[in-house]
Amino acid sequence: MPELCTTETWKPVVGHEGRYEVSDLGRVRSLTWTCDCADGRQRRFRGRILKTPLGDTGYPRVNIGRFPLKVHHLVLEAFVGPRPEGMECRHLDGDPTNARLDNLQWDTHKANLGDRATHGTDNAGERHGLAKLTWDAVREIRAGGRTGREFARRFGASESVVSR
C-alpha cells in the first residue's frame, strides 16, 4: 500500500520571525542564522527541528527566548492570527498533545469546558480529586438496604456525603 504524502507548511513564529518557524503539523524549527560576537567574530547557528517536551499541564512546549511557549499557541498565532479577546485554544479531539492546525481553533472557555465533558476529560464525579465515592458505591447506596451510618463506615465517607 503506498504511503500518504503529507505536505508540511511552515510559517514564522510570531515575535521570532527570521529565527524560528512552526508548521501546520505542530513542529517547531530554528533557522540557520549568524550573529556578530563581541570579539568581532561571527557565530553561525544551524537550523534544526526543536524538541517539544510536555509541560506540567500536558501540553507540548518549546523553549524560545526567555520562557517556554506552548506549541498549540504558536501554531494558531502563525496560521490563524492573534488570540481574540476572551478566547482560548481549543483542541477539537481532546488530546492536548495534538498540536496540528486541523485540530486547533480559537474559541470560548465555555466551548472548551463543553469539549472536556464530551471527551470525558473533565474531572467530575469519581474523577474529581476530592471525590469520596465511586459510581459503583453510589449505585449501591441508592439501592439501599443499609443505614447511612453503615454505608459511611463501609465506604470511608461521612454520613453527610452518603446522604447527598
Image (cartoon, helix red, strand yellow):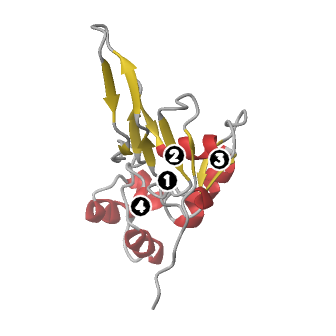
Badge 4 is on which residue?
126
Between 78 and 90, the residue placed more toward the observer is 78
Residue 97, given in percent of the width and then of the height, sits at 44, 56
Q: Is residue 86 above or below residue 49?
A: above
Q: Which of marks 4 and 2 is in front?
A: 2
Which mark is drawn over residue 26? Answer: 1
Q: Nearer the viewer, mark 1 or mark 4?
A: 1
Report how far apart the C-alphas of labels 4 and 2 lie in the structure: 39 Å
Q: Nearer the viewer, mark 4 or mark 3?
A: 3
> Secondary structure beneath disc 2?
strand
Residue 5, given in percent of the width and then of the height, sits at 52, 74
Residue 112, given in percent of the width and then of the height, sits at 62, 51
> Secondary structure beneath disc 1?
loop
Badge 2 is on which residue?
22
Label 4 CA crowd tier, 10 Å (few <14, some 14–19, many 20+): some
Q: What residue type is labelled 4?
A: Glu
Q: Which of marks 3 and 1 is nearer the N terminus?
A: 1
Label 1 CA crowd tier, 10 Å (few <14, some 14–19, many 20+): many
